[in-house]
Image: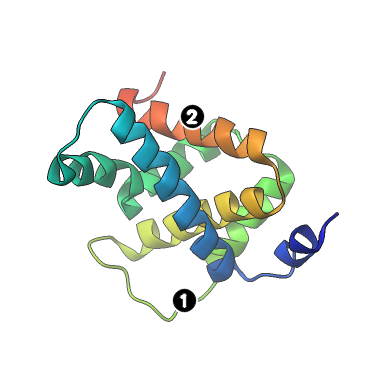
Amino acid sequence: MNKTVDQAFLLNGSALAYMGDAIYETYIRRHVLATGVTRVNQLHRKATKFVSASGQAKIMTYWLKKDTLSEQELTLYKRGRNHRANTKAKNASIQDYRQATGFEALLGWLYLTDQTERLEELINQAIDYIENGEE
């Protein structure tokens, strides 16, 4: 393991979510640009349904229902979900906000531990779920 991977295991849920938020936002921005939309206001509105706390909570609820995550991934999700943050949820219930933090922590951990294939698999599932609903 490299130093970044070793350090990822030591990070708290909020720090992992901080990284995961940035990574997920980047993938979503690339996705909405690929739809052909070029006006910034439209791009923002389209991206919001993916990156909002309620959208991320819906994805997590779906993944938990479908038993999508490995035991280790579930543990990392819970680390983020259960971490007591000093910030308050904006435009989201506390439950959605905490689930979204767990979602972002999981993605941050996958990124920092160089599990790019799994990260992209989950992000693609998330995009598909938000766009198409349950299969």
Q: Secondary structure at mark 2?
A: helix
Q: Are marks 2 and 1 in contact (CB under 8 Å)?
A: no
Q: Secondary structure at mark 1?
A: loop
- Residue at the farthest front position: 38
Res. 30 image quadrant: top left
Assign the N terminus to one quadrant of the image.
bottom right
Badge 2: how crowded within 10 Å, few (<14), some, or many (20+)? some
Q: Nearer the viewer, residue 31 or 102?
A: 31
Taking the image as shown, residue 114 lies to the left or right of residue 27, namely right
Res. 6 image quadrant: bottom right
Please name the residue that numbered disc 2 is placed on.
Answer: 125
- Residue at the farthest bottom position: 86
Q: Percent x, y for residue 106?
A: 59, 52
Query: Is residue 99 in sight in this rendering?
Result: no
Residue flagged by tag 2: what amino acid is it? Gln
Res. 92 image quadrant: bottom left
Q: Percent x, y for residue 72?
A: 73, 48
Badge 1: how crowded within 10 Å, few (<14), some, or many (20+)? few
Q: Percent x, y for residue 47?
A: 28, 42
Q: Nearer the viewer, residue 107 or 61?
A: 107
Taking the image as shown, residue 29 lies to the left or right of residue 82, namely left
Colouring mode (rainbow / by chain / secondary structure / one colour)? rainbow
Q: Residue at x 46, y 56 (%)?
A: 22
